[in-house]
Image (cartoon, helix red, strand yellow):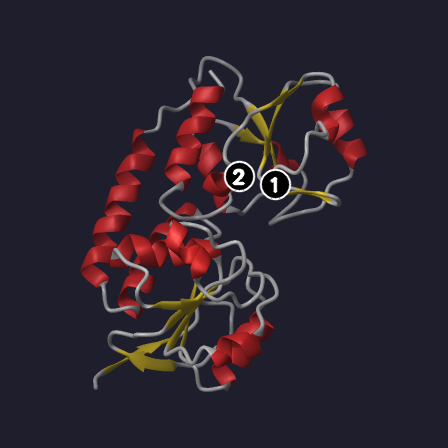
Amino acid sequence: MSARAFIGIAGWSLWISVAAAEPKRIVTLSPALAEMVWEIDGTLDRLVGVSEHTDFPAGARALPTVGPFHQTSVEAVAKLKPDLVLATRDGNPEAGVKRIQALGIPVSVVDTHSIEQWLGAYAQVGTSIGRSKEAAEVAASVRRELEKIPKWGVERAPAVIFFVLQESPLMTAGNGTFLSEALNRLGGQNLGDEAGQGYPRVAREWIVRKSATRAIHFVSLVPKAGSKPPFWSKLPNARTVDVPHDLLSRPSARLIEGLRILRRAIP
């Protein structure tokens, strides 16, 4: 049987992994990676394990889970006997990924911190699962749809948006994330850029000060639990924009629909 060689992306000191040309037992370590496999392969038949909260497409909910994407259970992965594990630098701890590879399991690591890295990840996933042509077609389609989304006009001040990734402690998407770049591409302004790089924690007092001087659109990417209004509902100049949380929190093709909803909601 022929094989392919994979190596982790720059910044992670992974060694070369060798996997079958068309792996039959794939485990994905983030919900977005499972969606990407489905988008490229057109089926979930080769997926034998996924990270927690992998719920799209619907059939993925029935697959065994290997823990949350930020705390993968290496033991659970090993029990599934995969011939390929797909991991991401945007959330999977490097130490856990190295432990999986140390067991002799082939690992392919992508990066999705930026839009171009995300689109490039399709090529790597496609190569990893033996579907390069299909991956190129998906990536090209996603790029076309992204470019079709109307941008906010330059004649007005950009819409200021704050993504709520976690409420306690409060966490947002800052500079150097795919969410921030996607918003900036549309002519919006990501308030999280002022909070720091990556996914910084933010004091609520900081938000109170920011909302006193400008209108802020709050987009919660936290699944709704109960009817209690969010803390920002009483802040001056605050507006809540409803977008299904999983559409914007995952770098997969469904991000396009999330951005469309966001754009329509803010004139």
Whether residue 17 sits left or right of residue 160 in the image: it is left
Q: Residues within 10 Å of mark 1 (few under 14, many from 20)?
A: some
Q: Is residue 194 above or below residue 218?
A: below
Residue 107 got which mark?
none
Q: Check disc 1 and give the amino acid type.
A: Val
The residue positioned 57% from the left and 68% from the top of the image is 72
Where does label 2 land, which residue?
Answer: 245
**Considering only order in the chain, which callout, 1 or 2, is on the residue closer to the N terminus?**
1
The residue positioned 53% from the left and 17% from the top of the image is 157
Where residue 148 appears, as percent x and y from the top left, is 30, 30
Where residue 122 appears, as percent x and y from the top left, is 32, 56
Q: CA distance from mark 2 to mark 1?
A: 6 Å
> Hey, which residue is sitting farthest top in the picture?
155
Where does label 1 land, which residue?
Answer: 222
Q: Check disc 2 and give the amino acid type.
A: His
Q: Is residue 54 visible?
A: yes
| Helix, strand or loop at mark 2 | helix
The picture quadrant where one finds residue 164 is: top right
Whether residue 190 sits left or right of residue 45 in the image: it is right
The residue positioned 72% from the left and 18% from the top of the image is 213
The residue positioned 60% from the left and 61% from the top of the image is 70
Tag 2 near tag 1, CB within 8 Å: yes
The picture quadrant where one finds residue 166 is: top right
